[in-house]
Image: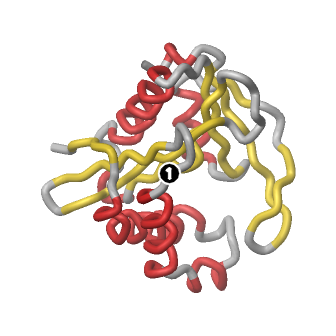
Amino acid sequence: MHVIFPAGPEDALALAQVHVTCWRETYRGLLPDSFLDRMSVPVNARRFSKSLVTPAEHEITLAAADRDGVVGYAAGGPSRTRLAGEAEVTTLYVLRRSQGYDLGRRLLTAAARVFADQGAKSLMISVLRDNIPARGFYEHLGGQAEAPRKEPGPGGLLYEVSYRWADIRALT
């Protein structure tokens, strides 16, 4: 049984642990090992703490937990493309041990509901082009892929693909 809730500053350390673990589980072979090995839970906890104490306008962080603690999260806000009425989920991670329980879809749906309540009409999320499992997940949920684009990332330029839901209600 999982519960999804708005994350607060007291969740910063747990979110950082999930973030670092998920990056290491997900991006081995896609990003440089040296970068993944240097990721720091305390550094990420400080970042989460700051963003949860004073979130920017319309930014959200939702956490998912089971009886053992936080196992996933979704975060986002207004689209970085600044398209009017578009929200963006900037991060969506679920620990590998908690995948397969519909938690990723539930987190994405919960975020879409919050954004829709804030007035968003559409939603986007970006993923590494070579992260095939995540791409399949977004396609299964009806996301429409755009052409891959180069973005700066750890180790140099990476290819990302954005998925869009022109009508956010498709997810809510």
Q: Residue 42: give x, y in percent of width and height.
A: 44, 81
Residue 82 as seen in the image, left or right of residue 12: right
Vertical arrangement, residue 12 with respect to residue 76, above or below: below
Q: Residue 32: give x, y in percent of width and height.
A: 69, 76
Task: Give the position of the N terminus as an image quadrant.
Answer: top left
Q: Residues within 10 Å of mark 1 (few under 14, many from 20)?
A: some
Vertical arrangement, residue 82 with respect to residue 23, above or below: above
- Out of 52 and 167, give the one closest to the viewer: 52
Residue in the image at 47% along x and 28% along y: 112
- Out of 69 and 95, give the one closest to the viewer: 69
Which residue is denoted by mark 1 in the rendering? 55
Residue 2 as seen in the image, left or right of residue 45: left
The answer to which quarter of the image holds residue 135 is: top right
Q: Secondary structure at mark 1?
A: loop
Residue 159 as seen in the image, left or right of residue 127: right
Residue in the image at 57% along x and 36% along y: 136
Residue 8 as seen in the image, left or right of residue 119: left
Task: Give the position of the C terminus as an image quadrant.
Answer: top left
Q: Amino acid at mark 1?
A: Pro
Q: Residue 115: give x, y in percent of width and height.
A: 50, 28
Q: Residue 33: give x, y in percent of width and height.
A: 64, 80
Residue in the image at 53% along x and 27% along y: 140
- Out of 32 and 20, give the one closest to the viewer: 20
Vertical arrangement, residue 148 with respect to residue 17, above or below: above
Residue in the image at 44% along x and 34% along y: 111
